[in-house]
Amino acid sequence: MIVIDLLDVLGDKVKTEEHKEGMEHDHDHDDHDEGEHDHEHEDEEEKDEHVWLSLKNASALCEHICDKICEKDKANKDTYLANTKSYIQKLDKLDMQYKDAADNAKSKTLVFADRFPFRYMVDDYGLDYYAAFAGCSAECEASFETVIFLAKKVDELGLKNIFQIEGSKSNIAKTVKDNTKSKDQNIVTLDSLQSVTKKDVDGGVTYLGEMEKNLSVLRDALL
């Protein structure tokens, strides 16, 4: 068995968790006792592991995986190289479609009433965001202050859409919506691909297919 650490492959392209204005702190990291070990981990930065949500990263990772497969099965190297080239062309085409959507967007800021695992995606296309929680947060309940902050951002930016991720019960998004002035925003969902099951894959779910769906949601929401 060959194990590939995708974070190691990307090296300095890997981002650290970002705490944006208005975002909830992850209290799980704050509940240690006072004492000499209080600052033991204060300089450690948590890596944002949602690297697959960048199509550019996906291309680089596919190339590395192909190289490792070719090393293992040299007899079929040409087939692996051809398949990888074809797949990366599809990734590059979709990447350009994302760029076009972002370039033509009326609004370039997303408000996420949820966790935000899409930092790689927004950074790729020059978009900004505000969110209730960081991507790796274990929190699921937003404070009144966070809800009001996000609602005010929706009003300030004149946004017509409030984002959430797959599997969300929409509670926070609905609360944010109810605290805006117009209370008429759409609640839309982007899929972070963290909940894909074997049954989904057997049923035809693919990375490209889900990222195409995300593009459709994003394109409509940014108009």
Image (spheres, rainbow, N blue to C red):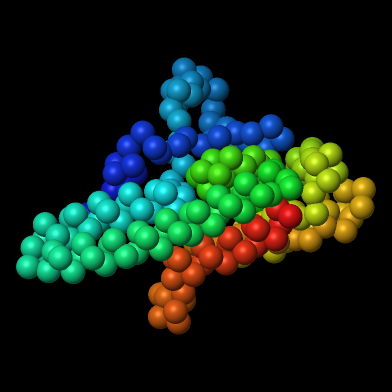
Q: Can you say whether 64 is above or below 206 in the image?
A: above
The residue sitting at 42% across, 56% down in the picture is 92
Q: Which of 123/31 is in front?
A: 123
The residue sitting at 51% across, 62% down in the picture is 211
Specify whether residue 112 is in view. no
Position of 117 with respect to 46 (left or right) is right
Percent coordinates x, y for residue 107 in the rendering: 73, 46
Which residue lies most toward the top here? 36
Quadrant where the C terminus lies?
A: bottom right
The residue sitting at 60% across, 33% down in the picture is 19
Position of 120 with respect to 69 (left or right) is right
Percent coordinates x, y for residue 1 in the rendering: 16, 60
Position of 152 with respect to 125 (left or right) is right
Percent coordinates x, y for residue 176 in the rendering: 81, 50
Which residue lies most toward the left here? 75
Position of 73 with respect to 96 (left or right) is left
The residue sitting at 15% across, 65% down in the picture is 78
- Tally the numbered discs: 0
Specify whether residue 178 is in view. yes
Q: Which of 86/65 is in front?
A: 86
Percent coordinates x, y for residue 160 in the rendering: 80, 54
Where residue 177 sits, quadrant-wise, is: bottom right
Where residue 43 sits, quadrant-wise, is: top left
Which residue lies most toward the right here? 181
Q: Can you say whether 180 is above or below 192 in the image?
A: above
